[in-house]
Amino acid sequence: MSQEARNHSAFLRDPDLPFLESRDSRIAGSPFGVHTHETFAISVVTGGATMLDCRGGQWLIPAGCVVFLPPGEPHACNPRPGGEFVYRMFYVERAWFEARCANVPRMGGLDLEHPALLEDPAMIRTFLDFATSQDRRAQAAEKLALWERAMDALLGCAPSHVLTGGQARAERRAARMAADVIAERPADQLSMAELAQACGVSPTHLPRIFRQTLGLTPLAYQNQLRVELAKRLLATGTPIAQTAAQAGFADQSHLNRVFRRYAGATPRQYLLGSRPG
């Protein structure tokens, strides 16, 4: 069986939990390049193992581990050659996550600014209990209660490893300013000169510090945000060809190529793999 045939992803956008998107995946090969998420991301590895590339290092993440990623954190997760990994991913809107943090003490020391690895079986069980409630389409109140329990367990859990590192603060600030411009106008054609002027550095200096900060080039970052925009448009029923135009892609074929690279599935597979809440 080919690696592509072994890949499977089901996306769940639950109307009872509008701040959350879930993904149930089995991945073989190396479908993911370096990318970021605009949300907080929590990945529960349930089978196989993945190699996490992040902060200039590489970590082997086996089943029974959780990867916590703050918004905007460059990373890539792919199985080792010939292997596969199975995981449940939870994308949590920043506003909801931060509001929960304001009401629940982070007793375990989880730092919202740094990616972390966690290996607490009891905490992992809470996320899998929530996933089961989604799969069996439990009532809204039950799902919310189980999700809040999982979040509280995460915030109370001590990371087994915190990933740190980075470059000078001024360079990070300039790169983030350029990223903000791209985030405000992901579908627009933005020149390097325009981005450099917005963050106060030279057009030749910006690509280097941008890549050091976000792990990818300004164009790759923009393509990633275009994919996120395309996902939102597809979720509201926008036809694929129209989605391509509105998200800033040259055509539907361009959308397919880029979407597959960053989402691990084509736009059509994203729609077919989506389960109603």
Image (cartoon, grey):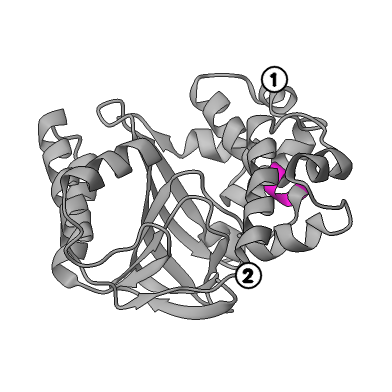
Q: Residue at x 70, y 22 (%)?
A: 246
* Residue 59 visible (yes or no): yes
Is residue 220 rendered magenta in the image?
Answer: yes
Kindly report the distance in space between the C-alpha atoms of the residues bearing marks 1 and 2.
40 Å
Q: Which residue was labeled with disc 2? A: 167
N-terminal-most mark, 1 or 2: 2
**Residue 258 locus on image (x, y percent):** 71, 45
Across and down, in percent, residue 197 comes to 82, 41
Q: Quadrant of residue 159?
A: bottom left
Q: Which residue is mark 1?
A: 242
Q: What secondary structure is the stretch in magenta mostly built from?
A: helix
Decide which of 141, 225 is in the foreground and name it.
Answer: 225
Callouts 1 and 2 close, C-beta under 8 Å? no
Pinpoint residue 227: horizontal percent, then vertical percent: 63, 39
Query: The residue tagged with tag 1: helix, strand or loop?
Result: helix
Relative to residue 183, is residue 235 depicted above or below? above
Report crowding for label 2: few under 14, some 14 to 19, many 20 or more residues within 10 A (C-alpha). Answer: few
Q: Which residues are magenta?
A: 219-223
Quadrant assignment for the C terminus: top left
> Residue at (43%, 55%) from the top-left corner?
70
Q: Is residue 234 above or below residue 155?
A: above
Amino acid type at image mark 1: Gln
Residue drawn at x 27%, y 39% is 99
- Element at badge 2? loop
**Viewed as shown, does residue 184 lie left or right of 146?**
right
Q: Amino acid at mark 2?
A: Gln
